[in-house]
Amino acid sequence: MSNYSDHIDETVLKTWFSAKTIADPQLTRFINTNHLPRIKPSFKDVCNRLFGCDNPYHAYKPELLPAPMPYKAHIGEKTLGAIEAQLGRKPTFGIEVGSFIGSSASIIGAWMREHGGALMCVDTWCGDINMWLLGNFAGTMRKMDGDPVIFKYFMNAMFNSGLTETVIPFRVSSIVAARALKVLNYEIDFVYLDSAHECGETFMELSLYYDLLPPGGIIIGDDYMMFPAVKHDVDLFCKVNDIQLFFTGERDTWLIQKPVAADNVLPLPVANEVA
């Protein structure tokens, strides 16, 4: 058996769990040429940078699809209120990691639209382990040719919710998105982490997206009690980084905040109060 400890020390781990990539020559030239300033981007800023156009929905035609499986969002007014309360202001740029058919993106996007904000949704839209192996997802995956149609359901949801000038679909893995966002130097208010729910992967994503946040920035997530891997990795991440875990009071939705001055933080229910 390989002796990992001989080769993988804290320096290596910090490199892996940083959102900063070890840039190849092409990316190095891009970084050195563009000198990207720290900005809070608008919808058009992101779209022009990623897609070379003002709006990617203009090139997409919604498709008539069978109704997707019922999939209720896990968050609502309590969680949105907790984000705003902890930030001390209304957010203008947020990230959702793991969007599936757009149930939660529709809720967060509508909230962001109210004050002219933008929401980037990061997902491959290829599904996770359960979606590939369990039959109850078959009608929404519709993967007979190996290409799930989840993305089309998501895009239809954004059209139907009137969010085509608010929600930005970024169809890449969570790691690619985090490393790209680090290069782009965007200032992010909050991240909703709701992706694969796998042990180790959740810890990696927490590390990458926490690294992207400014002081006071927020990460929220759900499924703390439902998915053992989520609870394991969230608890471990908080322990490693000496961070307090909070709950928003909405199901088992959790919240962590990058440290700020103590007098700017409003109290939420602590971790041991969750049912």
Image: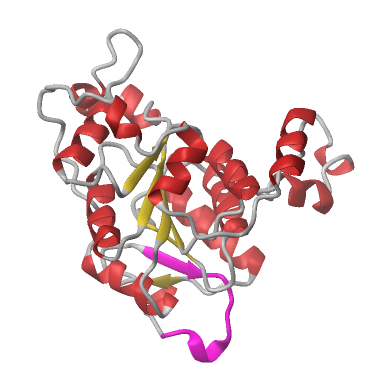
Q: Position of residue 158 (x, y in %)?
A: 23, 41
Quarter assignment of residue 5 = top right
- Residue occupying image coordinates x 25% and y 61%: 111
Mark count: 0
Residue nearest the observer in this picture, 253 or 100: 100
Left or right: residue 121 versus residue 233 is: left
| Magenta stretch holds residue 274 | no
**Quadrant in which the C terminus appears:** bottom left
Task: Identify the residue at horizontal 81%, vertical 38% (top origin).
Answer: 4
Left or right: 33 with respect to 187?
Answer: right
- Does 261 appear in magenta? yes
Q: Position of residue 200 (x, y in %)?
A: 58, 44
Residue range of the region highlighted in magenta in the rendering: 254-266
Position in image of residue 156 (x %, y %): 19, 33
Whether residue 194 is visible:
no
Q: Residue at x 48, y 71 (%)?
A: 245
In-front residue for pair 114/271: 114
Residue at image position (47%, 64%) is: 189
Q: Is residue 59 above or below residue 257?
A: above
